[in-house]
Amino acid sequence: MTTTKNLGLQKQKQIHLKTIKIFGPPGTGKTWTLIERVVKRYLKNGTDPDKIAFISFTNKAVDTAKIRALDAFPHLDSKSFGRFRTLHSYCRRYFEEEIFDPKDCMIDYALQNNFVKRSDNRLSQDNFTYSDWSIGIYDKARNLLEDPILVYKRESQKKDSLDVFIRKISTYEHYKTSGGERSFLDFTDMVERALHEVDFPSLDLLILDEAQDFTPLQWSLIYKMADKVKRIYLAGDDDQAIYQWNGADTRYFTKYFPGRKVVLRKTRRFGTAIHQFSQVVRKGIIDSVDKEFEPLVKDGTVKRYLSFKEIPFEKDDGKWFMLGRIHTTVNELKALAKDAGIYFSDNHGRKSFDQDQWLAIKAWTAISNGREIMKKEAESMYKYIREVSDPDYRTPKFWSKEPDYKRYNFQTLKEWCGLDLPDEAQKKQWWWILRRNFKPRQVIYFLRLLKRYKQFKLDEAPNVIIDTIHSVKGDEANHVLLYSKANWPSSYRHKDKEEKSNEKKVWYTGVTRAKDSLHLLSTDYKYHYPIGEDYLVYVQDRKN
């Protein structure tokens, strides 16, 4: 493991002289500072953009940095900033092997791309996915630069026996190279190979954003890159280090990597109420670097609720985050939101209702009011009409000869396309006509949506996002709801101070996404994260 201790005094001194570490509490503008104060200054001074590398933990942060740079220098294009990447993407460009997307499961990917045969007896014995617990532990061990068996023994939940764990690791590695001439790499492979095989180019400037989230393996690569860099900027917040489960080690940012420390002291996000509550949560974080910061000159609100119905969603002023700790509680939030008739999406933009169903509803609403619709809308509507007697009429072959721009009304659909509905059906509302492939709860949800929102609102992107706390890290919203329910005893029930501290970091990250108001939802369920206890401390502090 590469740390300050084994660098040697001379190399420590060299890195320290050319490195600045920016500690940025929530909303203090870490990325803004890196782009506006650092990147733009170098570009104005004539630095070749290809001599600047901006590396962050997420694609979103990289894209934001690239957009800001392009806005300031419109004579440049996106290709000019080819070194604005995630660390994995930075490594990927050096390898020709197939790279599988971590969103895909490992074995399924191999099968779909004919890398392996389904008849392979190893596959039949261990039909596991990339998200399999054993493979997750193996990947964590590689990122920690530790023996996988030692990491397995250290983990509190041993979901597989040691023999099964070892066999799955062997199988996993077997499939990477079992495709004959075509092998492939996972993301950790890319970093490992780059560390040993790639001769990185000389750079004038290396920027690492969200530096608290890199793993020991990734830091080893960063140490190697640093040898050929004139100036290094690191930016992050150790209190928002929420990826320890994947091997991230914030100590490299706070202690091991030498450099001069700069602290951003003014948040641009929230006022005194949210700031005070965030500091109550932050007290549970151990080994936190001192970085006191000031809130905005406004109050804001922090309030606790025992029922979802109490939360004032009727105020559709601005963006909402509704956040759970894990996907199970996120799904519960989505169910509650649908019961309340709230229009939402996840952080990937997937809306809360089926788009084809919505298109069919709009199409019927149009023709029932005497308006014309396009061919695509008519085809969508036919999939859901309940009274069609002949299934062939649902997708008429006749339409294949018609141009896409042709328009239809109720009568032309009846006369030309086999719409088997009486004239009086035109007066019926969509929920009487569109029943095929609609579940009753979907109909009810659409009725609630249309009662709450105007039609054009449902064509726009929703202002409510429901997802995990991890998914919105680095983002912000006017209003944030945190759902504190847990489905099993949380780390807070354990005696391990580090586990408790790591959970506090997750909730601190969630709390500090809020700009104007923070809403804490508790229930009478037996398992909870202690946001309720933190709130009582906060209320008492406000009284004093």
Image: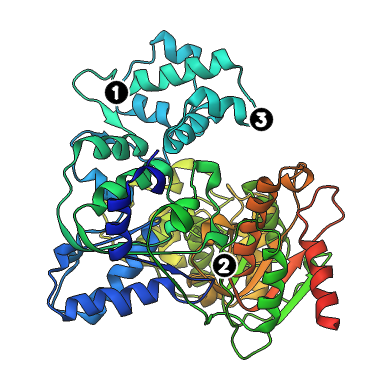
Q: Is residue 513 visible?
A: yes
Classify 189 as above or below 439: above
Horizontal and vertical percent position of residue 385: 55, 53
Q: Nearer the viewer, residue 516 or 542?
A: 542
The one nearer the camera, 13 or 115, is 13
**Which amino acid type is shown beneath numbered disc 3?**
Gln
Quarter of the image where one finds residue 110: top left
Instruction: Identify the element where label 2 is drawn.
Output: helix
Neighbourhood count class around disc 1 (C-alpha, 10 Å): few under 14, some 14–19, many 20 upward: few
Disc 1 marks a residue whose amino acid type is Asn
Residue to which mark 1 is pinned: 114
Residue at left offset 36%, top offset 45%: 218
Residue 351 showing in the rendered view: no
**Does residue 489 appear to the left or right of 419 in the view shown?**
right
> For numbered disc 1, what is the local secondary structure?
loop
Q: Position of residue 479 (x, y in %)?
A: 63, 75
Q: Earlier in the sequence, mark 3 or mark 2?
A: 3
Which tag is nearer the camera, tag 1 or tag 2?
1
Helix, strand or loop for disc 3: loop
- What residue is disc 3 on? 157
Query: Pointer 2: what residue?
Result: 426
What distance separates the C-alpha of mark 1 from that of mark 3? 34 Å
